[in-house]
Amino acid sequence: MSISMSRLGSRISQAHLQLDRTSDLDPSVAEALAFIVPLSADYPGIELWFRTKVVPGLMDGTRYLHRVEREGQLVGLGIAKLDPFERKICTVRIAPTYMGRGMGLRIFDSLLKWLGTDRPHLTVNETKLHAFERIFDWYGFNLTSVQQGVYVPNCSEYAYNEAFNVSERKDTGSTDYNFNNIDQDFGLRVLGQNHQ
């Protein structure tokens, strides 16, 4: 499904109206939520995930939200998670008219830098996989499992880099952990057209 910028703007405005409860959020966080919702029709529960996982994580420093704006308008974002047990790219969204312009790589670079690793855990839905294969190849990500129905019934979710060591991060001084953890977070997503 392709969404034009004007139609996306209209859907974001509608999301703002539907999400009156965003008044309790920081304006830039509320804008990010309003940006994600219209691009997430095929991922039920995205608002609940954002409010219960992302917002508290932004406040306690375990989540990072990277915004990309063009001409004062939010056109892309990425969300990452860093805690003692996991370094994960949770979500990437790009406005449809900005897809294919290298914005995804720039978002990935920012998230990887914040996470302090080049092997984060991430997942991608089978319908979006082809949009990310070049990025995953570029970074050398390793496919570690495929699971059915994790987020969407009857749909496969491809997981990358599940088992890795969380090495000491300079700014946190955290210790090494070895784990194999699949968080029930929303996996990596770029939504807006059939593909990405």
Image (spheres, helix red, strand yellow):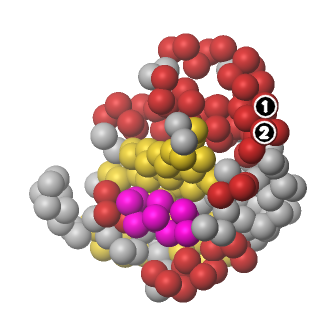
Residue 196 pos. (x, y %) = 72, 65
In the image: residue 170, left or right of residue 66: left
Q: Which residue is identified by label 2?
A: 6
Whether residue 72 is situated above or below residue 127 in the rendered picture = above
* Occupied quadrant, residue 125: bottom right
Question: Which range is magenta?
Answer: 102-111
Residue 65 pos. (x, y %) = 44, 45
Whether residue 63 is situated above or below residue 55 in the rendered picture = below
Q: Residues within 10 Å of mark 1 (few under 14, many from 20)?
A: few
Report the front residue among 180 and 161. 161
Three-letter amino acid code at the position of disc 1? Ser
* Occupied quadrant, residue 112: bottom left
**Distance of mark 1 from mark 2, alpha carbons?**
6 Å
Report the front residue among 31 and 125. 31
Name the magenta segment's main secondary structure: helix
Note whether residue 164 is visible: yes
Q: Which residue is identified by label 1?
A: 10
Q: Please tell me how many numbered marks the rendered image carries.
A: 2
Residue in the image at 73% along x and 26% along y: 13
- On whether residue 110 falls in the magenta region, the answer is yes
- On whether residue 57 falls in the magenta region, the answer is no
Question: Mark 2: which secondary structure?
Answer: helix
